[in-house]
Amino acid sequence: MMKRFTPKEMAYELLRMAEAKVTWLDTFAAEGWKKRPDGEIAQKRLELAVLRQAKDDYNAAAERKETEA
């Protein structure tokens, strides 16, 4: 069984995932031969927004946990 991640670890991993989405968008959302369909780009932008919100939530939880200790 995998260990559970701490809120700080979760925030870090979510940040890495969000950065990968930004790289994908930079590569495939611009006009040109690599451009992906608009629906796919919209989905990636939605996923990026969710990842960023979750990262912020986990960072807040980590801060609360640190102040309680």
Image (tube, grey):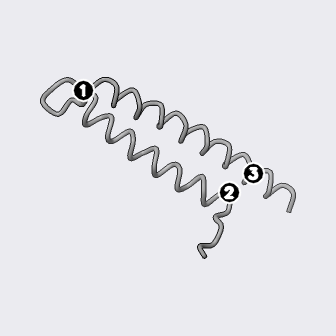
Dot placed on the residue nearer the N-terminal end, 2 or 1:
2
In the image, residue 8 above or below residue 17? below
Q: Could you tell me residue 35's position as x and y percent? A: 21, 29
Three-letter residue code for mark 1: Ala
**Quadrant of the snapshot with the N terminus:** bottom right
Three-letter residue code for mark 2: Pro
Instruction: Determine which quarter of the picture holds residue 52.
Output: top right
Q: Which residue is mark 2?
A: 7
Seen at 24% across and 31% down, the residue is: 36
User: Are circles 2 and 1 on residues that touch, CB within 8 Å?
Assistant: no
Q: Is residue 65 left or right of residue 13?
A: right
Of the pair 43 and 20, the residue shown nearer to us? 43
Q: Mark 2 falls on what kind of element?
A: helix
User: Are circles 2 and 3 on residues that touch, CB within 8 Å?
Assistant: no
Seen at 12% across and 30% down, the residue is: 33
Q: Mark 1 falls on what kind of element?
A: loop
Seen at 60% across and 45% down, the residue is: 55
In the image, residue 24 above or below residue 69? above
Q: Which residue is mark 1?
A: 30
